[in-house]
Image: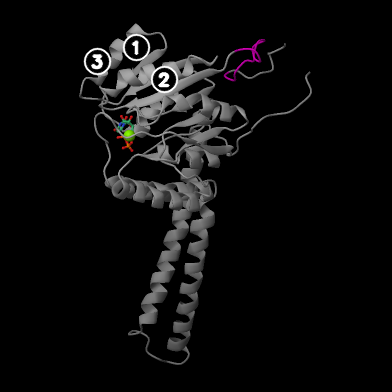
Amino acid sequence: MDTSLIPKGQPQPSLDEATRPLRLSVVVPVYNEVESLPRLVEAIATAVQPTDFDYEIICVDDGSRDGTTALLRELALSRSDLRGVLLRRNYGQTAAMAAGFNHARGDVIVTLDGDLQNDPSDIPMLVEKLEEGYDLVSGWRKNRQDAALTRLLPSKLANGLIGWVTGVKLHDYGCSLKAYRSELVMDMNLYGELHRFLPALAFIEGARITEVPVKHHARQFGQSKYGLGRTFRVLMDLFTIAFMKKFLTRPMHVFGGFGLASLALGILLGSYLTFLKLVLGQSIGDRPLLILAVVLFLTGVQLFSLGLLAEVAMRTYHESQGRPIYRVREVVEQDR
Ligand code: UDP
Ligand code: MG
């Protein structure tokens, strides 16, 4: 095959593309999971080895302080299917996942938690589902083993809200057990605690998404790294996502719209008051309407300028990273 037309940096198709085993990267962020880690690595290997996937396990140590780091180093040196990525300090689960993504070499990436709450035996099933023609398969902890009041209830509310805002209806956004096509992951940039919004971000990137029920176990070792404060952070992130989904490439449409409406109303009220003052000779200095007119006018100007600034920021965002404003699924043409 003549590959000279394929731009540099794009994957070069190899002759045995169809027969080559699927390459799978299993990405696991771990933070203070010293007891779970060896069991987890073993369980993943046991789950994946019977398949004919060519696999690697990538454990990202997120600045642990309980000996996880040393253990991971030792394990990674002793087995060929494990790579340890050791972060300098604790950056949080989202960053740890992003580090894992950046080190993954597979065509398919599966993520799961390092605390054995997700069951590695579900991995082959997720990948098979993905192979049916999806870009992202999300796990759904149908029978979730966490505290009802502090975990399940907030999570149920959050899932409903996220589904409503983003338009991607999944039962369980918080489930870490997910499978992705790797090129999808490479298109997404993660910030804050956005990992739970990966399906929403993927949807923005035009991905085909589905979910499948997966097993879930109670935490055996160590403890959860999160408390109720997470609910608030998730809510804040949701605003970001909602904005990105609708207006990322055209912020002026939202700011400009509100700004213009506010400005118009302010000018209208102002004209009315000017008419009263100049034509009818009434005093308007003590009228609340005057304050309203001024506030509306100034708000309008502010929103309008904010929209323009956002337009500039958005262009910088896309152009500085070479991010196109569209995503091509495939190009279809006759073999030349
Ligand atoms: N984790 C991490 N960095 C952090 C917090 C958590 O890498 O700062 C990892 C943690 O080791 C686990 C996963 O993220 O593998 C999920 O954390 P956890 O089990 O505490 O969350 P929960 O299941 O309680 O929602
Ligand atoms: Mg957990």
Q: Amino acid at mark 1?
A: Ala
Instruction: Examine the structure image and report whether residue 12 is included in the region drawn in magenta.
Output: yes
In primary-sequence order, the first of circles 1 and 3 is 3
Q: Nearer the viewer, residue 330 or 45?
A: 45
Residue 144 found in image quarter:
top left
Most common secondary structure along the magenta stretch = loop
- Outermost left residue: 66
Location of the C terminus by quadrant is top right
Judged from the image, the secondary structure of the residue bearing numbered disc 2 is helix
Q: Nearer the viewer, residue 219 or 285?
A: 219
Looking at the rendered image, the disc whose residue lies closer to the viewer, 2 or 3, is 2
Stretch of the chain drawn in magenta = 9-20
* 3D distance between C-alphas at marks 2 and 1: 14 Å
Residue at image location 44% in from the left, 43% down from the top: 172
Q: Amino acid at mark 3?
A: Ala
* 3D distance between C-alphas at marks 1 and 3: 10 Å
Residue 134 found in image quarter:
top right
Q: Amino acid at mark 2?
A: Ile
Q: Nearer the viewer, residue 176 or 273?
A: 176
Q: On the image, numbered disc 2 is attached to which residue?
A: 44
Tell me whether the residue at label 1 lies in contact with that at label 3, contact meaning CB atoms closer than 8 angstroms. no
262 vs 229, left or right, is right
Residue at image location 36% in from the left, 76% down from the top: 291
* 3D distance between C-alphas at marks 2 and 3: 20 Å
Please, is residue 48 above or below residue 322 in the view? above
